[in-house]
Amino acid sequence: MSMSLDGKVAVITGGASGVGLGIAQEFAAHGAQVVITDLDRSDLDRAVRQIGSASTGIVADVTDMAAMERMYHEVKTGHGRLDVVVANAGIGAHAPLGHITEDQFDRTFDVNVKGVLFTVQPAVPLMPDGGAVVVIGSTGSIQPPAGMSLYGGSKAAVRCLVRAWIQDLKGSGIRMNVLSPGAVDTPSLRRAAEQAQGTDAVVPLIRAMGEGNPTGRIADPREIGKAAVFLASDAADFVTGVELFVDGGTAQV
């Protein structure tokens, strides 16, 4: 089976930067027409320029069901079809037990869990037999570092949602899988490292994060994109309900 996405229309939430942008770039490189969503128009415009002519950007908030429904209506009107959805938009609020705030909890679960529901639920009725949904999880769902209970818990919740949803989708021909990265070398990770330890510490810190990984490094966003292409393509036409860890082996040791 081919990993070509020729003729397919894909929506990728949180696609203006980081992992979402890497996924969008790989989808476009494999022939898809890509629609990325995010919160900021200027970020979307910059990402569309990077991805190329096979992409468009729509401002939409995954925590707003009406906004997501409008976005999908725009996709169907403009492209005539919807074949693939990548529920990538997510945030991380980190605090140890005893210091977790109500706002941190609400915001994390609104974006990471409710946002996945609001991304997937209105999309499914628009998708054909052979459609594919890829939900971005995290190794944090099974190996949450200290202080990351909210993020890890939200990603564990998403995995449980998918386990149930593949049963709800029985007979539809739509596949759904979870793709769980480990650490990825994104601009946001580098900004966080700079804020925490200063500019000179960024490269050593990124290097150190990969030392416990069997590959000896962390991922590039395009590597996560390649795995997402596989799950979205006909090459994975009998793969549904899996959690694919794309983490260089971190989750296995």
Image: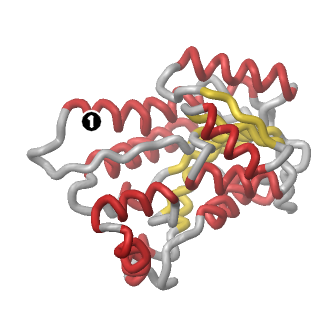
Pointer 1 local density, CA inside 10 Å: few below 14, some 14–19, many at least 20 = some
Front residue of 220/204: it is 204
Instruction: Locate residue 44, reporting x and y percent.
Output: 65, 38
Q: Which residue occupies 57% across, 33% down? A: 40
Give the image quarter of residue 56. Answer: top right
Task: For the C terminus, give its image quadrant.
Answer: bottom left
For residue 247, above or below residue 34:
below
Q: Which residue occupies 53% across, 49% down? A: 136
The amino acid type, in three-letter code, at marker 1 is Phe
Q: Which residue occupies 59% across, 26% down? A: 60
The answer to whether residue 24 shows anywhere in this view is yes
Residue farthest to the right, as pictured = 7
Task: Using residue 36 as the reference point, say whether residue 117 is left or right of it.
Answer: left
Task: Using residue 170 as the reference point, say whether residue 150 is left or right of it.
Answer: left
Q: Which residue is mark 1?
A: 105
Q: What kind of colouring is applied to the model shown? A: secondary structure
Instruction: Locate residue 28, reporting x and y percent.
Output: 80, 51
Instruction: Locate residue 224, reporting x and y percent.
Output: 61, 62
